Image: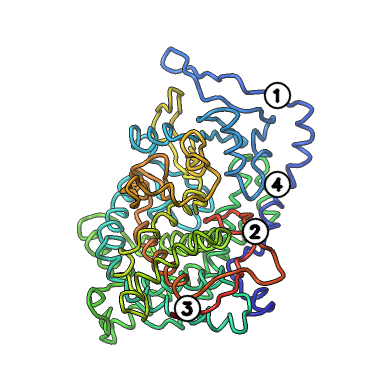
């Protein structure tokens, strides 16, 4: 694709990294002064409750006024929290300014929060950025209550059910073929391919077509798809940045000075316009008499866009006396974009990076794919019917997810006073469940930092029959767990399975000659943790 494309076309690279740190520069003088008055809060704290005194979780040393905020400045807080867990134990209390946060970093703590006391930990904090962008009407960030229950029911039963996942198989098939064509075009004469960017393009087009029912791939690639990708970068920055005023009220002026609120307003207006256009186009096609899924076959004959399903649900719910308005429809669509685009691309990107760094593992998986598919007399495009025959695919993806979870920190808020591993956790306490640290816990995982797909095979040599991806094994929670676990895991993984298999079937992959011998695995945070540098390997077409 060339240097110019890498520089200009890599839409998912966050261009305002300095914005992540700039507001915190105002805290630097305060942090320096606080060093003089540095105090320890490592001993057990207690809280008077009901005539007795109940233990709060242990807390590492903090600073006056700002608490532990200076310790978490940076783009990779999950690494800092993992290190803290090794020193202070599986349940830790932090204070970001005035805000208490409990961090859970063990499988036992996760099981108690997501199963034993799931209801008590079922809340979700809504900061100013979340409230501005979602208006409290979505599903992912909505507070625990009746709206959340209704929104989740609609999503689970109608948007993300197994039937719905199957109904979009033709969309995935077409966009996977388009991705392969882009790889071939970009990799002429052994040129490096910016695979990171192409994967984001793929995932955004699939989501656009699923959301609005548009069968025109180019519409998602160069038109609204390009707009969507830019908007999602802006939303990711805002949600990751938060506001200083939330945790240190007397520094709220820094948010205004840095233009955070102004950017939030611009982003909200642009998002709202984008979603309104998508819904209007959808209505126009329906008025034109075009049936959704027309031209498809099999299950695709029944394919309905997310917008169509949500608008029907809106009418049904309102008829039943439940407010499920247009604002909620747009907020849930935005949930789908945020949860699906970055996550799908990130998982495939990390899997390809690990396989390039472990060529023996790549060779074994490629041999299985090519033997199973070409050996079966089918040298055409891979379909989802082929995937169930591959025994090595799931172990490779599970090991990728174990080491590189798109969302290593699961955010909750307590809705009532409760306990966690014997410690008191008051109502309205923010909670972070560090599922990334749990998946790398050396007490659970042998050679925990190594990429070993073989760990997912049973004694008989076959893949382990585990329900881990569904959130039932609390040592491995790539999509969270409990009632607030991600309901879209199956939808996203359907794309991941097909794309990874197709890339490995049609191409041999290696790093450019004369460059690094391995992929740089440094990461950068966001809504999905991803490679810090774009993955740009050489793709050599394979023919049997």
- The numbered mark at residue 24 is 4
Give the residue at mark 2: 520
CA distance for labels 1 and 3: 57 Å
Which quadrant would residue 386 be assigned to in this image? bottom left
Q: Which SS class for mark 4?
A: helix
N-terminal label among 1 and 4: 4
Residue 452 in sight in this render? yes
Give the residue at mark 1: 39
CA distance for labels 3 and 4: 43 Å
Query: Looking at the rendering, in which quadrant would you find the C terminus?
Result: bottom left
Query: Can you tell which of label 4 and label 2 is closer to the viewer?
Result: 2
N-terminal label among 1 and 2: 1
1 and 4 marks in contact (CB < 8 Å): no
Residue furthest out toward the left: 320
1 and 3 marks in contact (CB < 8 Å): no
- At which x and y percent is residue 414? 42, 35
In the displayed structure image, the side of residue 319 where residue 218 appears, left or right: right
CA distance for labels 4 and 2: 28 Å
Q: Is residue 327 above or below residue 99?
A: below
- The numbered mark at residue 180 is 3
N-terminal label among 3 and 4: 4
């Amino acid at each position: 694709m060339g240097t110019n494309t890498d520089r200009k076309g890599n839409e998912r690279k966050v261009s305002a990294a300095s914005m992540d740190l700039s507001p915190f520069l105002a805290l630097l003088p305060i942090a320096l002064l606080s060093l003089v008055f540095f105090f320890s809060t490592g001993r057990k704290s207690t809280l008077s409750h009901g005539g007795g005194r109940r233990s709060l979780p242990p807390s590492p040393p903090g600073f006056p006024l700002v608490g532990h905020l200076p310790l978490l400045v940076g783009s990779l807080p999950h690494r800092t929290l993992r290190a803290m867990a090794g020193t202070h134990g599986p349940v830790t209390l932090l204070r970001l300014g005035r805000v208490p946060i409990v961090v859970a970093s063990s499988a036992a703590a996760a099981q108690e929060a997501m199963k034993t006391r799931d209801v008590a930990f079922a809340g979700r904090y809504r900061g100013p950025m979340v409230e501005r962008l979602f208006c409290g009407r979505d599903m992912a960030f909505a507070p625990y209550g009746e709206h959340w229950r209704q929104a989740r029911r609609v999503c689970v039963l109608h948007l993300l059910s197994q039937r719905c996942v199957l109904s979009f198989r033709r969309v995935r098939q077409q966009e996977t073929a388009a991705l392969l064509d882009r790889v071939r075009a970009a990799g002429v004469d052994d040129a490096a391919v910016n695979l990171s960017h192409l994967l984001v393009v793929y995932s955004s087009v699939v989501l656009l077509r699923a959301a609005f029912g548009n069968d025109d791939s180019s519409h998602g690639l160069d038109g609204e798809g390009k707009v969507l990708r830019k908007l999602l970068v802006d939303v990711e920055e805002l949600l990751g940045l938060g506001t200083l005023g939330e945790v240190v009220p007397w520094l709220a002026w820094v948010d205004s000075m840095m233009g955070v609120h102004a950017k939030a307003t611009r982003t909200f207006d642009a998002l709202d316009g984008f979603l309104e256009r998508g819904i209007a186009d959808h209505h126009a096609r329906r008025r034109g008499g075009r049936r959704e899924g027309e031209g498809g076959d099999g299950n695709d004959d029944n394919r309905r866009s997310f917008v169509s399903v949500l608008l029907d649900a809106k009418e049904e719910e309102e008829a039943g006396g439940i407010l499920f308005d247009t604002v909620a429809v747009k907020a849930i669509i935005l949930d789908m974009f945020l949860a699906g685009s970055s996550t799908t691309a990130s998982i495939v990107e990390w899997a390809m990076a690990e396989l390039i760094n472990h060529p023996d593992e790549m060779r074994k998986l490629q041999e299985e794919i090519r033997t199973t598919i070409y050996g079966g007399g089918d040298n055409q495009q891979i379909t989802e019917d082929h995937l169930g025959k591959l025994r090595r695919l799931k172990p490779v993806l599970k090991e990728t997810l174990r080491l590189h979870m798109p969302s290593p920190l699961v955010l909750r808020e307590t809705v009532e006073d409760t306990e966690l591993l014997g410690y008191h956790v008051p109502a309205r306490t923010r909670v972070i469940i560090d599922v990334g640290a749990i998946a790398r816990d050396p007490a659970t995982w042998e050679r925990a930092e190594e990429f070993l797909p073989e760990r997912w095979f049973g004694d008989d040599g076959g893949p382990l029959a585990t329900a881990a991806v569904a959130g039932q094994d609390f040592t491995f929670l790539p999509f969270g767990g409990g009632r607030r676990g991600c309901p879209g895991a199956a939808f996203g993984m359907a794309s991941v399975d097909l794309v990874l298999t197709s890339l490995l079937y049609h191409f041999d992959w290696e790093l450019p000659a004369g460059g690094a011998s391995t992929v740089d695995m440094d990461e950068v945070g966001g809504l999905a943790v991803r490679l810090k540098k774009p993955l740009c390997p050489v793709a050599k077409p394979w023919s049997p």
